[in-house]
Amino acid sequence: MDGGNQSFISEFVLWGLTQSQNLQVLLFVIFLILYLLIVLGNITIMILITTDHHLHSPMYFLLANLSFVDIWLSSVTTPKMITDFLRKHKTISFAGCMSQVFFAHCIAAGEMILLLVMAYDRYVAICKPLHYFTIMNLKRCTKLVLTSWTIGFVHAMSQLVAVLQLPLCGSLEIDSFFCDMPLVIKLSCTDSHNLDILMNADCGVVVVTCFILLLISYTYILITVRQSSKAGASKALSTCTAHITVVMLLFLPCIFIYVWPLSITWLDKFLAVFYSVVTPLLNPAIYTLRNKEIKNALKRLKNYFKNHKVNT
């Protein structure tokens, strides 16, 4: 195959998570259930926040956006992975592969910036409570969310442009369940060492910068919380703990895949599954289980449907 011309490349072969047919059937059932839980869990949070006026505040506006992003983060790769469990020959078109590269980076980077915005929201709420609704008004929150998407788009475009310049050749087999940037780079006909460094640096700017800023933000918030009243401190600590847990679940796998890659195939697959399936699944659970307002909103929604059923 002529590696200098991408137009001749029609498809890539995906090896998936395993070659065992029996195991693939089991994984099909497991991941189908997990994906349905991801979609239903995050949609439930979005509906609760949209319909319940008690949750019409900046923090929950941002949480609804996080749920929206989580659905898309999982949907970039998980449906394809699920259907491939039932296929003997797992392939993906060139356009499909490049779409996965773009949207995986766009959505993941956007979520990282969104988590930074959520940390800023908690900082203002805890450290400047009297000015909270003035600073975190709907207009500013909307601008911050749009900024997160813009940064994600720019980051993803830089990755996509780089990979489209690569001359690809050989068997075009990818030892994973989706097209990931480091694995596509390995298919290059030329020495890709410089591009690997560029990709690590590009991802590092987003991932490491956001991670460090988040650690600094929550450290400052927790120090402030320790000096506040017991009642307020308990609620703030619960919210911040949930946020920190979500941050760790997303950032640590991404750091070890894109910034400081360990180059261990099974571990890379595990980490990729973790941030594309486990993280979007746990986010709604973490916020629901640790948040009294969300629990109360869920009860009100249940009571509404119960009363509506009785009246009809």
Image: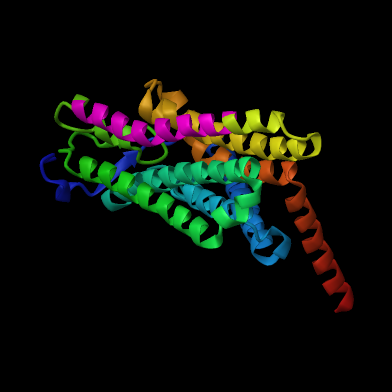
- Foreground residue, 260 or 82? 260
Q: What secondary structure prevails in the magenta region? A: helix
Q: Residue at x 62, y 40 (%)?
A: 127
Residue 70 against residue 134 in the figure, above or below: above
Q: Residue at x 43, y 28 (%)?
A: 255
Image quadrant where residue 159 sits: top left
* Residue 215, magenta (yes or no): yes
Q: Residue at x 73, y 34 (%)?
A: 228
Residue 100 against residue 243 in the figure, above or below: below
User: Residue 221 location, x and y as percent?
Assistant: 61, 34
The quarter of the rendered structure image containing the C terminus is bottom right
Q: Residue at x 52, y 38 (%)?
A: 24
- According to the image, what is the colour scheme of the structure? rainbow
Residue extending farthest to the front is 130
Residue 74 against residue 256 in the figure, above or below: below
The quarter of the rendered structure image containing the N terminus is top left
- Foreground residue, 186 or 198? 198
User: Residue 100 location, x and y as percent?
Assistant: 36, 47
- Foreground residue, 173 or 137? 137
Q: How many marks?
A: 0
Residue 66 is left or right of residue 158, and the answer is: right
Residue 195 against residue 61 in the figure, above or below: above
Q: What are the residue bounds of the magenta stretch?
A: 194-219
User: Residue 168 location, x and y as percent?
Assistant: 18, 38
User: Residue 73 location, x and y as percent?
Assistant: 48, 47
Would you say residue 200 is visible in this rendering?
yes
* Residue 172, magenta (yes or no): no
Would you say residue 85 is visible in this rendering?
no
